[in-house]
Image (cartoon, rainbow, N blue to C red):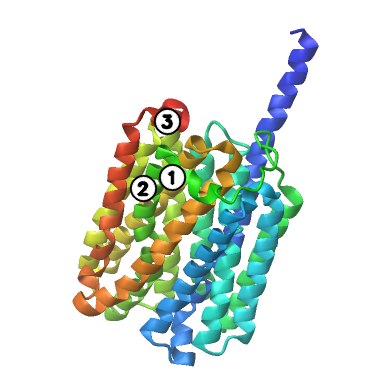
């Protein structure tokens, strides 16, 4: 290669490197803004309880409706191969816009639980076109360092899901205005991807529509075990996110701590997951994804068992354990997705990620519903223990994956 060719190649590689970091920042910001829609209703539950006289069952359904909407959205997307047969940037932007409109309709038109649940279902359905497509876009830019990149993306997503609690804590006393503000954030997230994010150099041409791919992805043994690990993780994650803020509010009521402190504490606890995702991604790229996911699930399962004993006690001890749980419960999430992108068929990686998310989120509807029943039976002291079996079974799946020959494909041989 002559000097001019080397110089041209060097400039191309430098431009590609700069492009991927720019994409990582913009896409992470877009995910943060768009995924603020997820818990927008959960964050204003205290106001809704008073205004609508909500029962505990109705409160649960405000969260479960989003999960079920997401499941339906991902199921439709997976069977139609949407992330693989159309441009994922357009899919992301369109779904972010539609989710923002559905959330704004909740803020303006919802005056009872039934209307609210229907609009929350629509919001969740549209978010199915935001989360998995975002991961696929990032995978087209990062072959090496993918665990870190996806960790940063999921970390931003985690901050986004925590942000409604901050908006509700320090924003307007009118919950409807807070909901509309969050819808504006999601619109901005969609615009960022539509106008400023591009597909990476590792993007493949659009795949052919294949209805069977939604099921065929699980014939791959490595993808199947990585998904089992993800399912155990998901059994715990959203039930913790949905009910830990409720537990913190109840505990701070007992200790006579201000309600604003409870809202800000909920944001910080869930937001700790952002740091957990980035740190876990950096470590996973160096020592292995199965190791990091197993440790993260082991720590979070321990927190499931310990957190209840802090209820009604020293609020600083409660928040310390909650922060450790908040960091560990989501730290492993991106690594399951990274495993699927490395072990699955690259032509249908979007379908595989979407189908994995579909089943995982379906499981969350069960665990979210179980927690309040256990609160009534055994109190907050033991209620979260019902979540511990999920991450523990996830550890078993990831250690089994680590022992397989195909695990050498994970993180360039760092299992």
Residue at coordinates 24% horizontally, 80% vertically from top-left?
Answer: 376
Tell me whether circle 2 and circle 1 mark residues in contact (CB < 8 Å): yes
Q: Is residue 76 visible?
A: yes
Q: Extreme right residue here?
A: 4
Vertical side of 64 occupied by 192: above or below: above
Q: Residues within 10 Å of mark 3 (few under 14, many from 20)?
A: some
What residue is pinned by disc 1? 336
Residue at coordinates 21% horizontally, 78% vertically from top-left?
Answer: 377
The quadrant of the rendering that contains the N terminus is: top right
Q: Residues within 10 Å of mark 2 (few under 14, many from 20)?
A: many
Residue at coordinates 22% horizontally, 76% vertically from top-left?
Answer: 379
What residue is pinned by disc 3? 286
Relative to 244, 338 lies left or right? right
Give the alpha-carbon distance from disc 3 to disc 2, as whole Å.
20 Å
**In the picture, residue 57 is in which quadrant?**
bottom left
What residue is pinned by disc 2? 229
Give residue 66's position: percent from left, percent from top: 50, 70
Relative to 192, 223 lies left or right? left
Tell me whether circle 3 and circle 2 mark residues in contact (CB < 8 Å): no
> Which callout, 2 or 1, points at the residue further toward the start of the chain?
2
Give residue 127's position: percent from left, percent from top: 58, 63
Give the alpha-carbon distance from disc 1 to disc 3, as whole Å.
16 Å
Vertical side of 237 occupied by 7: above or below: above
> Which callout, 3 or 2, points at the residue further toward the start of the chain?
2
> Which callout, 1 or 3, points at the residue further toward the start of the chain?
3
Secondary structure under badge 2? helix
Q: Nearer the viewer, residue 143 or 402?
A: 402
Relative to 5, 25 lies left or right? left
Q: Nearer the viewer, mark 3 or mark 2?
A: 2
């Amino acid at each position: 290669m002559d000097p001019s060719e080397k110089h041209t190649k060097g400039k191309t590689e430098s431009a590609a490197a700069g492009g991927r970091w720019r994409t990582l920042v913009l896409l992470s910001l877009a995910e943060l803004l768009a995924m603020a829609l997820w818990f927008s209703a959960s964050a204003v539950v205290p106001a809704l309880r008073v205004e609508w006289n909500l029962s505990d069952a109705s409160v649960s359904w405000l969260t479960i409706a989003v999960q079920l909407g997401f499941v339906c959205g991902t199921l439709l997307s997976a069977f139609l191969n949407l992330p693989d047969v159309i441009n994922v940037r357009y899919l992301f932007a369109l779904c972010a816009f539609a989710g923002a409109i559905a959330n704004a309709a909740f803020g303006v038109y919802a005056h009872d639980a039934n209307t609210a649940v229907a609009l929350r279902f629509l919001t969740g359905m549209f978010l199915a076109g935001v989360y998995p497509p975002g991961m696929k876009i990032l995978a087209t830019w990062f072959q090496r360092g993918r665990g870190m990149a996806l960790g940063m993306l999921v970390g931003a997503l985690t901050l986004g899901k925590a942000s409604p609690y901050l908006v509700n804590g320090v924003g307007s006393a009118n919950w409807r205005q807070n909901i509309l503000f969050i819808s504006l954030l999601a619109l901005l997230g969609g615009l960022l991807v539509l106008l400023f994010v591009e597909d990476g150099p590792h993007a493949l041409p659009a795949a052919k529509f294949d209805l069977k791919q939604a099921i065929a992805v699980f014939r791959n043994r490595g993808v199947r075990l990585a998904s089992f690990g993800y399912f155990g993780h998901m059994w715990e994650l959203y039930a913790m996110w949905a009910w830990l803020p409720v537990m913190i509010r109840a505990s701070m009521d007992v200790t006579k701590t201000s309600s604003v402190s409870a809202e800000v504490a909920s944001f910080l606890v869930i937001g700790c997951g952002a740091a957990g995702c980035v740190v876990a991604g950096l470590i996973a790229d160096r020592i292995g994804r199965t190791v990091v996911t197993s440790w993260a699930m082991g720590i979070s399962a321990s927190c499931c068992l310990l957190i209840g004993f802090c209820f009604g006690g020293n609020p600083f001890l409660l928040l310390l354990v909650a922060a450790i749980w908040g960091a560990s419960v989501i730290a492993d999430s991106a690594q399951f997705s990274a495993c699927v992108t490395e072990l699955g068929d690259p032509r249908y990686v979007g379908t595989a990620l979407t189908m994995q998310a579909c089943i995982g989120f379906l499981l969350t509807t069960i665990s979210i519903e179980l927690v309040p029943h256990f609160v009534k039976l055994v109190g907050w002291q033991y209620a979260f223990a019902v979540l511990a079996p999920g991450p523990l079974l996830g550890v078993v799946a990831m250690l089994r994956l680590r022992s397989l020959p195909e695990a050498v494909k994970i993180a360039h041989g760092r299992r």
